[in-house]
Image: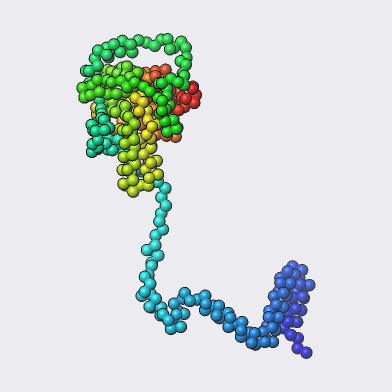
Amino acid sequence: MKRSFRNRARDFFVYMGKRYRLLIVPAILGLAISLMLCNLCDYFRRGTKRFACTIFILLCFMLGNSFAYPVFYDEAGFVTETEVKDTVPVIEDSDITLMEYEETTFDSIPVIDDNEVLDGYVDAELHGMDEAEKYSLTDILEENSELLEAESEVTAEPESKSEEKLPVFLADDWKLVLINKQHPVPDDYTFKLGDIKTIKGNMQCDERIIKDLLGMMQAAGNDGVTLEVCSPYRDLNRQKYLFNRKIEIYMSNGMSYMDAYTISSQAVTVPGASEHQIGLAIDFVSDDYITLDEGFADTDAGKWLAAHSYEYGFILRYPKGKEYITGIEYEPWHFRYVGRDAAEVMTKENLTLEEFWNKYL
Ligand SMILES: [Zn+2]
């Protein structure tokens, strides 16, 4: 009797498994698959109807999943391939571009200068904003000559006493009040605005710093450096106006509110968190460099201030490289009065006001 395919396959795999130990696993697999195929063939051989039904179901399944192919429409007489091409616009790969996500980098965005914001501004309610408030040394000196003579005697006095004992710093000292984004101006903060008469009008700041400010300007003048004071005191309205106006400008250039807010808060201090509001900060320019930007650092005035301002109680409030501490970009023109002792410590130890507070208060 002729041996069936099933028996021959079984004998072959059993023989291979026994003869070669290494082939035992493939032999078992081969045996299982060949037996399964044989059983399947037997199953269909015994019932051709069953076989036809299975093939029919498989065909229906394939067609049902293939209706997206125009070629089937064509065969079925619905839509030809060319018709589909005519009605459906062809989209080339090159037409499709993914929207690029670009994280906002503020470095590339030009900082809006206060003066740009103020351009064309007319509102009598916010006093002193319709014209640039810049007071040159000569403006001030001519009107304050007697006061300065008295001051120069005081400032000329050597401070030998401070050499003997270390200065004590107190947290409630008005000179050391810390104002930044985390520490807004306290609601109950009061101070007396002092006027310095100038030819153009009155310059205002905390009256307690006028003596040192004039002394510093005169000393700079003696060294051949002409300092100009630019908007020392700004009230809250002006600060708010500057801030909101900058946000508007950035948003009109297509920036989102959040981005505009972030960059505006870097360029101008957030309302309520500015030292200009408490009359202790002075922005300086010089007669040959009148814009408030980083270039001021390279001018004679900028260099003189960086080197000597501490002698008169002023510090460079937002130094380069400490932006992560102050939260404000480098401002070589912005000086803050902290008193002579503190200014000396901060300058010699290279501390920001924030770091000074951490260490001494
Ligand atoms: Zn400033």
- Residue 116 appears left or right of 278: left
Q: Residue at x 77, y 76 (%)?
A: 15
Q: Please tell me which residue lies in front, 24 or 334.
A: 334
Q: Nearer the viewer, residue 238 or 181?
A: 238
Q: Quadrant of the N terminus?
A: bottom right
Q: Is residue 218 above or below residue 10?
A: above
Image: 290 above or below 138 = below
Q: Quadrant of residue 278?
A: top left
Color scheme of the displayed model: rainbow
Visible residue check, residue 206: yes
Q: Nearer the viewer, residue 324 or 234?
A: 234
Q: Position of residue 208 (x, y in %)?
A: 35, 18
Q: Is residue 196 above or below residue 269?
A: above
Tell me residue 11's x, y (percent): 76, 79
Determine the residue positioned at 38% across, 37% down: 265
Residue at image coords 34%, 35% = 240
Q: Position of residue 126 (x, y in %)?
A: 27, 32
Left or right of residue 275: residue 217: left
Q: Residue at x 40, y 21 (%)?
A: 175
